[in-house]
Image: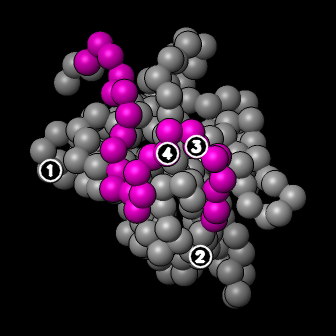
Amino acid sequence: MSEPAEAPSGLELPADRPRPPVASLRGATRALRLPAAVTASLRQVAGREGVSLDVLLLAGLAALLARYSGAEDLVIGAAGLTSLLPLRIQWTGDPPFERLVASANGALRAALANADLPFEAPLQVLFAGPGAGLTTVPPAEGLERLPSGERKLSVDLALSARTVEGGEGEPQLLVTLDYAVDLFDATTAARLLEH
């Protein structure tokens, strides 16, 4: 499949409120801890598909964003250890999940191969998987802790996942969604996270 020349200009997610003319940059956070059995199942699926858990979670995020927005061409910013990588994932029709996983894997490989090229499109969604070695998307890439406990958030959504130790010492995924409070209510963010 050939890539269009221009990246999509934006992602229209169904928000609770219209985008204000000037964003306040205020963000809030919702988190979800996946049970050890679910985490183990995700790792098995990733292994069966021949990809990392990061790629599998990225494909799931792309599927969710495509279904919520109706977009067939997505750009998701993936946080790496030293930079933000724009990942372009195309979703046409209703492809099998395996094809979306392969597309996410290809997007990550292409972004890593072209990490030194400039990328001009504004990013609205950031992702940091457990393989990034991060506890959250780095502040320099869109998030900044504020003294009040709120976040300064320069994107609409930022999803991060990290492995934590469960109650019986088994690994679990802790998935965190930071969201722009100008656009989304806490209940909407919780629903997005659960999906």
Q: Say the numbered circle drawn on residue 33.
A: 2
Q: Is residue 20 magenta?
A: yes
Q: Give the residue furthest to the right.
A: 147
Q: Calculate the distance from the C-alpha at mark 1 to the C-alpha at mark 4.
A: 32 Å
Q: Calculate the distance from the C-alpha at mark 1 to the C-alpha at mark 3.
A: 34 Å
Q: Say the numbered circle drawn on residue 20.
A: 4
Instruction: Say which quadrant the C terminus sits in.
Output: bottom left
Part of the protein shown in magenta: 4-29
Q: Is residue 153 magenta?
A: no
Pick the residue in front: 18 or 100.
18
Q: Calculate the distance from the C-alpha at mark 4 to the C-alpha at mark 3.
A: 6 Å
User: What type is the residue that disc 2 sits on?
Assistant: Arg
Front disc: 2 or 4:
4
The disc, 1 or 3, on the residue closer to the chain's N-terminal end is 3
The residue carrying mark 3 is: 23
How busy is the neighbourhood of tag 2: few (under 14 within 10 Å), some, or many (20 plus)? Answer: some
Magenta stretch prevailing secondary structure: loop
* CB-based contact (under 8 Å), mark 3 and mark 2: no
How busy is the neighbourhood of tag 1: few (under 14 within 10 Å), some, or many (20 plus)? Answer: few
